[in-house]
Image (cartoon, rainbow, N blue to C red):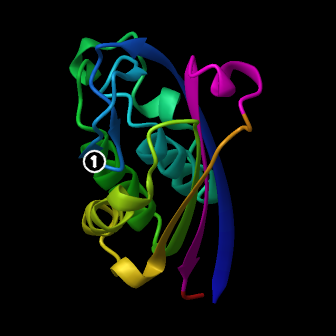
Amino acid sequence: MKIKVGFGFDVHQMREGHPFVVGGVKLEHHAGAFGHSDADVLAHAICDAILGAANLEDIGYHFPNTDDRWKGANSLDLLKHCVALIKEKGYELSNIDGMLCLEAPKIKPYIPQMKINIAEAAGISVDDVSIKATTNETMGFIGREEGVVAYAVCLIQKAD
């Protein structure tokens, strides 16, 4: 069996009055992540981890922010597409581990639904999706709530 690991990272600016979607869940907050799609930082980091594990470039290669087809796109749809791409190469997604870094809002109440959304989009069990969150201890652009960051790792495998 061939096993590969992928790492993903994403960052988005926060804008007052903008929707804040993370893991397919709209968070209650005065500001939200801004980007070409729905700016779901967690889904984007997961996409990059999956694509990287299969050596399929990155999210910007597949969904460039210069292409109007992706303007306002639901990032869970992008995740579904990334999983389909690795399946074309004979890989199956085994698990996802995601980490959010932001000062507010508190993420814990939203994690169960985020896990369900990501598991459904990725075609894996909720038990194979981990999501955690931390703050930046009020330091830097994250601490000033100017941006949000997500990291993700995943494991993919295929039979030899």
Residue 28 in percent (x, y) is at: 28, 36
Q: Nearer the viewer, residue 76 or 107?
A: 107
Q: Is residue 151 magenta?
A: yes
- In this image, 49 relative to 129: left or right? right
Q: Is residue 39 magenta?
A: no
Image quadrant occupied by the C terminus: bottom right
Asked if residue 131 is positioned above or below residue 28 in the image, the reply reads below
- In this image, 5 relative to 38: left or right? right
- In this image, 68 relative to 41: left or right? left
The image quadrant of residue 84 is bottom left
Q: Residue at x 66, y 79 (%)?
A: 3
> Mark 1: few, some, or many residues within 10 Å (few <14, many ≥20)?
many
**Label total for image:** 1
The image quadrant of residue 121 is bottom left
Residue 30 in percent (x, y) is at: 33, 22
Asked if residue 97 is positioned above or below residue 139 in the image, the reply reads below
Asked if residue 87 is positioned above or below residue 48 in the image, the reply reads below
The amino acid beneath tag 1 is Gly
Q: For numbered disc 1, what is the local secondary structure?
A: loop
The image quadrant of residue 154 is bottom right
Q: Nearer the viewer, residue 110 or 121?
A: 110
Over which residues does the magenta segment extend? 138-158
Q: Residue at x 32, y 14 (%)?
A: 67
Residue 19 in percent (x, y) is at: 27, 25
Asked if residue 132 is positioned above or below residue 159 in the image, the reply reads above
Residue 147 in percent (x, y) is at: 56, 23
- In this image, 68 relative to 144: left or right? left
Q: Which residue is mark 1?
A: 24
Image quadrant occupied by the N terminus: bottom right
